[in-house]
Amino acid sequence: MKTLLIIARECRLRLRRPSFWVLTLLVPAVVAALYALPVVAARQADEATTVLVVDQTGLFADGLCPTESLSFKPMPTLDYAWQQASAHDLVLMIPRRETTIPHDAYLYYRGTPPTVAVQSAVDAQLQTLLRNAILQDVYDLDPTVYHSVESTYLRLRTHDAATGHESHLQVKTVVAVALAVLMALALLLFGAQVARAVQEERHNRVAEIVATSVHPVQLLAGKVAGVALTATLQLTLWIALAAAAIAGVQAANPNLFEQARAQQQHRSLATKGTEATVQYDTPVQLVDQTVEGLAAIQLPVVAGAFVLFFLLGYLLYGTLVAAVAARLDSDADTTQWTLVAGAPLLLALALAPLVLRAPAGALAAWLTVIPFTAPVAAMLRLPFGLPLWQTALASVLLVLCAAAAAVLAARTYRRHIV
């Protein structure tokens, strides 16, 4: 009962703080802004630009295709182009050479230089037209046929001979790294909140008063659990409000992301109508492979294991950080020692390339059963399949180590706070 009262007190203290609600509302707004602002800025910066083309070679002027942001106008001479050009127009000069293949092209401007996107778009069209001219005039090859052959793609599928299931190593690797980084950040963040709570009560002497009527273990358990509940509540609100904010931005601006979706579904025009077009479609293919890889991962199992290792890891690191904070007087020292306590998590992240290279190897197995590296190492191996006995062993060792850390932290509370 006393432990529940301490948990309720810890939750009330944090929920009453204006900073808790300010951050809870501010972070989703920032996430929504980061989601929408790049697209809005790109659309606003994507102004129509006119390029006056002086092509002395005769290879490019008729082949340049206008886009939403670019328009091309052939001009007979450079002097005439400058006479017709406005302050914001560009002049593209392709000089004639003695050889049949031009080596240089010049894009002139007045005042403000063109954006990188404009330069890249002009350059891409010039390179394509030059390549097509060389294929057709020098080597007598049909550019459409050549590009269809050049764009073909052979997908190497890695399958388990026993089950026939595909491995999806690339997708699983990305998921593993994301889970490991999220686990390490969450444990370090919530551990820092526990340390800050201990320091606050040590400075205002509240812990001494409370500790006279409850056992130090109850005081410690209530503090760790209270911080965990409020932090989990804040994290849940962040996810829900960020999703709602993003959905609101999309509902208020239904055409905002239409251009991005169109680019993602765009197909190569050079090989349209051929077998290579169906086979080689990089954006769509990448999305399909990602969806297939995620479907191959047992997401409920991954989510359950993540929650399990997070709770056990938080119990371990939360109690250790509480013991460290109880012994130190300076907030700066507490922050430094909190990072020291979380060093094994960072070590597991540093060894991630070796673990991902051999998820079933000896190094990965040892990092999984060592309690201080188990939360991160288990996340690195989870998408590839974590043996049940190793999961059970790691969980038992984490519980035992967390219990030992709780006893140590309780003694530290009794000695340095009470």
Image (tube, rainbow, N blue to C red):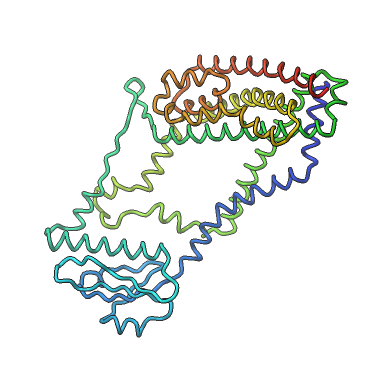
Quarter where residue 226 is shown = top right
Q: Which residue is at 22% across, 65% downward? A: 103
Q: Quadrant of the C terminus?
A: top right
On the image, the x and y values in percent for residue 35 come to: 55, 52
On the image, the x and y values in percent for residue 404 come to: 67, 15
Q: Which residue is at 71% across, 24% downward? A: 323
Horizontally, is 237 left or right of 86 in the view? Answer: right
**Image height of 259 relative to 176, above or below:** below
Query: Which of 167 and 196 lies nearest the eye of the viewer?
Result: 196
**Image height of 272 relative to 187, above or below:** below
Horizontally, is 52 left or right of 199 in the view? Answer: left
**Image height of 326 relative to 65, above or below:** above
Quarter where residue 142 is shown = bottom left
Query: Which of 196 and 310 lies nearest the eye of the viewer?
Result: 196
On the image, the x and y values in percent for residue 405 come to: 67, 18
Q: Which residue is at 24% across, 69% downward? A: 60
On the image, the x and y values in percent for residue 49 come to: 41, 72
Horizontally, is 196 left or right of 317 in the view? Answer: right
